[in-house]
Image (spheres, rainbow, N blue to C red):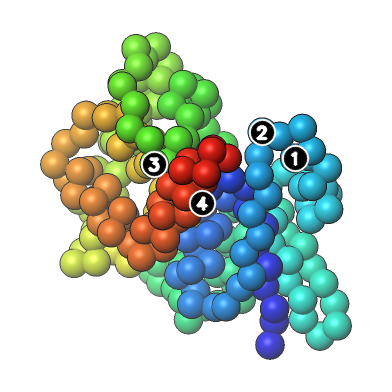
Amino acid sequence: MARYSLILGTKDWSSWSLRPYLAMRATGAAFEEIVVPLRRGDSRDRIVKYSRSGKLPALKIEEDGKTTTVWDSLAICETLAERHPEARLWPEDRATRAEARSYAAEMHSGFAAMRSNLSMDFVRRLPTPNLDDDTKADVARVIEAWTHALEHHGNEDGFLFGRFSIADAMYAPVVSRFVTYGIDVPPIVRGYIDRMFALPAMKDWSNAAQMEVDAGVA
């Protein structure tokens, strides 16, 4: 049996770490969790011990006497989907799966203005800043995308493509940003945000992030 170690950054800040954490939790597989504090003078030196890219997250897989390291959030999620098909981290229908992958990839490569101006601060609640046009456009596109997916693919499970999927994992940090900064959203999106925050994995992440804030490390 494979032994997993998931190396993450400070939970209150590390949006990229949240994504594979949720995917890993969705597999039900056991894993060791290692958190490297970010924004410290020695952070990079500590990170490169686990990830040659110098960035987090990273997933270490020990199996059959060999160790494989996977870096990049989306690559980790794809690896978990491949290794744990029973978790159904992508929709089963081919066309729906293609659309879900498009959602995930758009999040992975886009929304630069929103990332910059609405940085993840998971447990704090902050005033809504003045948003420039690019950030407003990013926010509007996310709301449009979520609304479309929920209206066309949502079911009683209540996630973007019915069951929780990698698409939801990839957008989870945006869910947190919208709450942190009090972004106004329509009811269908508000319901989705509430369901995401109700996930046990999101609750556990939030509790850990709160402990970081309380301890003064975030």
Q: Which residue is mark 4?
A: 18
Q: CA distance from mark 1 to mark 3?
A: 22 Å
- Kindly identify the amino acid type of the residue bearing the numbered disc 4: Leu
Task: Give the number of the mark in front: 3 or 4.
Answer: 3
Question: Please, what secondary structure does the residue beneath circle 4 have?
Answer: helix
Residue 27 screen position, x and y as percent: 49, 74
Q: Secondary structure at mark 3?
A: loop
The quarter of the displayed image where residue 76 is located: bottom right
Q: Which residue is mark 3?
A: 123
Image marks 2 and 1: residues in contact by CB distance under 8 Å: yes
Mark 3 / mark 2, whichever is N-terminal:
2
- Is residue 72 visible in the rendered image? The answer is no
- Give the number of the disc on residue 105: none
> For the residues marked 1 and 4, what is the alpha-carbon distance in whole angstroms?
18 Å
Q: Which mark is residue 39?
A: 2
> Which residue is painted at 47% across and 54% down in the image?
208
Alpha carbons under labels 3 and 4: distance apart: 13 Å
Residue tagged 1: 43
Residue 105, compared with residue 182, is above or below; it is: below
Measured as percent of width and height from the top left, residue 130 is found at: 34, 12
